[in-house]
Amino acid sequence: MSISISSRLQGALRRGAIIVALGAAALVASGVAEAHKAPRHASRPVGGIAVDVNRLLAMGLGVYAETVRGDLEAALQWEYAGGLPPGRTLLVRINGVSLNSYVGGYSLGFGNNDYLDGVAILIGPNGEELASEKILAVSPADSGGPWYVHGAERRRTAYLSTVFASWTHRYIPG
């Protein structure tokens, strides 16, 4: 016995899935907007870590930008081991990411590296900027293993995020 779904029902299901995805994206975006507003409100305690990937989103990197956000948030949480002192927020704004397209062999100069460029800002309980540091994290392009193994780019992004988080913690200890 075979069950077939009409093309009209398939279209409705697709539209429903798109609406759910757009709703989820709106929730994520509102959380980012709230994270930007939070440090300006001295009456309510703030604290934690926020990663702003709006520039990557503006470049059309969509899902990949969210991957960078997730990897970097996880790496920063691990690096800061449980958070920052009460009332402090670490805001990291990512300006750019570059994964080298060729990961085999060696080249002269600065080839075969991946880069994550951003700014880390430590914000106090009254919204004041306590510290700020520009960071350019660099990692070998082969950090994700062989390029032909599924998921190599994903592993490269995760590793690059840990490098960025490490430098952030070194410059801004909390």
Image (tube, grey):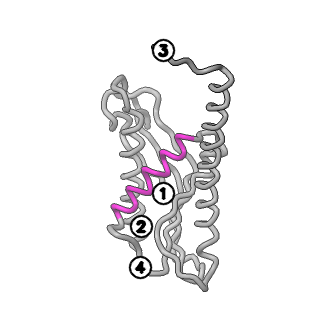
**Residue 123 in sight from this viewpoint:** yes
The amino acid sitting under disc 2 is Tyr
Query: What residue appears at the point 62 percent right and 32 percent down from the top-left corner?
Result: 13
Q: Name the residue under label 2.
A: 171
Say whether residue 132 is left or right of residue 104.
Answer: right
Check if mark 2's residue and mark 1's residue have beta carbons within 8 Å.
yes
Q: Residue at x 53, y 81 (%)?
A: 45
Q: Is residue 36 left or right of 64 when viewed as pictured?
A: right
Question: Does 82 appear above or below 115?
Answer: below
Residue 85 bears which disc, if any?
A: 4
Magenta-drawn segment? 63-79
Q: Decide which of 3, 57 is in the foreground and name it.
A: 3
Q: Which amino acid does label 3 sit on?
A: Ser
* Residue matched to label 3: 2
Give the overall secondary structure of the magenta segment.
Answer: helix
Q: Which of marks 2 and 1 is nearer the N terminus?
A: 1
Disc 2 versus disc 1: distance between alpha carbons?
A: 9 Å
Residue 22 placement (x, y as % from top left): 64, 44
Q: Which residue lies furthest to the bottom in this view?
A: 43
Rendered image quadrant of residue 108:
top left
Say what secondary structure mark 3 lies in: loop
Distance from Cα at disc 1 to Cα at disc 4:
22 Å
Who is closer to the viewer here, 147 or 125? 125
Indicate the quadrant containing the N terminus: top left, top right, bottom left or bottom right: top left
The CA distance from mark 3 to mark 2 is 62 Å
**Viewer-nearest residue: 93 or 105:** 93
Residue at which label 1 appears: 135
Disc number lying in front (1 or 3): 3
Q: Do the residues labelled 1 and 3 touch (CB within 8 Å)?
A: no
- Type of the residue with mark 1: Ile
Whichever of labels 1 and 4 marks the residue nearer the N terminus, that label is: 4
